[in-house]
Image (cartoon, rainbow, N blue to C red):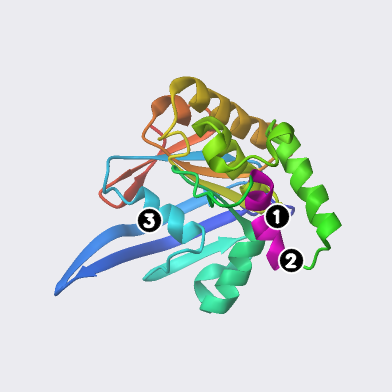
Amino acid sequence: MGPEGNPIVRVRNLSKSYRRGEQVIPVLSDIDLDINEGEFIALMGPSGSGKSTLLNLLAGIDKADGGSIEIGGVDITNLTETELALWRAAHVGFIFQFYNLIPVLTAFENVELPLLLKDLSKKERRVHVELVMDLVGLSDRLDHYPGQLSGGQQQRVAIARALVTDPTILVADEPTGDLDKVSAEEVLGLMARLNEEFKKVIIMVTHDPRAAEKAHVIRHLEKGYLNDRA
């Protein structure tokens, strides 16, 4: 819990629909969710259950139709697009299924990208990048391009990029979905370490029960409704 006993993430009555022509398709209905400081939560559920939509709302990528999302005391549903972009850059680290690395940039340059929005010198940026690349075990791969790295290494670069701004929350959408079993275990072990040693709040969408086992809390989405731990 936070210093006043408040959760770091507090979601109330959250709803989201999409329009397809005249049709309104509800995706999330009346979602309540609390995530405490230092918590690792897995969101599970069948395809189309709204897992990625909920993750995108929590990360400030998408806008809710109703309800509130409070993260670190800020209700992000009340922010303008510009305010939301600034908030996202400062407070959210993204880990995607397909890494989303830029192929023409080295591992170092990919990890450095989020820091270019900050008021840091080139030397300060290098210190930050080297620190997180060491943390993910890739200090010897700084000058390698994504195409020269394995899938597991690319995902670890992506995790370093997510960490480099020291965000409030890490959001991971199927982070092991494109990896072989050994690489998946390495990536999950790294995420568990980030949570245990550095108290990083991690919100992970996954289909994989083995991945979900790393989390403290497992919540299931079913047809847009959030159920308690199975």
Q: Main secondary structure of the magenta part?
A: helix
Label 2 SS: loop
Q: Which residue is mark 1?
A: 165
Where is residue 76 drawn, in percent x and y? Answer: 54, 69
Q: Which residue is mark 2?
A: 118
The amino acid type found where label 3 is placed reads: Thr
Q: Which residue is mark 3?
A: 53
Per the rendered image, the range of residues in magenta is 107-117
Q: Residue 153 colored magenta?
A: no
The amino acid type of the residue labelled 2 equals Lys
Which residue: 47% across, 51% down? 33
Nearer-the-camera pick, 14 or 180 = 180
Q: Is residue 39 above or below residue 100?
A: above
Closer to us: mark 2 or mark 3?
Answer: 2
| Viewer-proximal residue among 189 and 26 | 189
Q: CA distance from mark 1 to mark 3?
A: 24 Å
